[in-house]
Amino acid sequence: MKEIIEQLDKMGLIKYGSVITGELIRGMAGIELPETGTRDQFKDAALKELTITDYIRGKLISKGMYLHATKGDYRILSPSENKDQVLAYMKSADGKLKRGIRLYDNTPKQYLDNNIKTRIHLRQDSINEQKRRRDNLN
């Protein structure tokens, strides 16, 4: 997988605003989409592509870049677009925290761990502080 990133970099595609076709990534990874096939064959190809793009995305995030999927292709967001992606990650994390709280609150009391409840409160406090800061900036 590292080789794919190196190839993309040599091609000048690891930069803000670059469009990387899904076809190019699938070709570099040796993923073939069958013209006809079973659902499992298509699912297998899609999972392989997801694995590759998730790896690339992880490496690019370390460089302040985000690989965004658009209609079967990919684009590296511009720095000004990163804010929206950060907010999307935060919204997703907020939702997961709410689900975790609901699960914790509905777990039989004999199985509860006070350390988890403390961590929940710390995360909620952190989220509320971030929202206050964000509201003060706007």
Image (cartoon, rainbow, N blue to C red):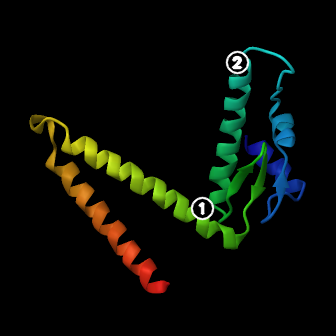
Q: What amino acid type is highlighted by mark number 2?
A: Arg
Label disc, if present, on residue 39 of the rendered structure: 2
| Residue at the image position 23 percent from the left and 43 percent from the top | 104
Label disc, if present, on residue 45 of the rendered structure: none
Q: From the image, tell me which residue sits under label 1.
A: 85
Q: Secondary structure at mark 2?
A: helix
- Give the x, y percent position of residue 53: 70, 43
Q: Quadrant of the N terminus?
A: top right
Q: What amino acid type is highlighted by mark number 1?
A: Gln
From the viewer's perspective, is 121 left or right of 47? left
- Above or below — where is 50 with respect to 14? above
| Residue at the image position 22 percent from the left and 49 percent from the top | 116
Residue that lies at the very extreme toward the right in this rendered image: 11
| Residue at the image position 43 percent from the left and 85 percent from the top | 136
Q: How far, Cα to Cα, is label 1 from label 2?
A: 31 Å
- Give the x, y percent position of residue 72: 78, 42
Q: Secondary structure at mark 1?
A: helix
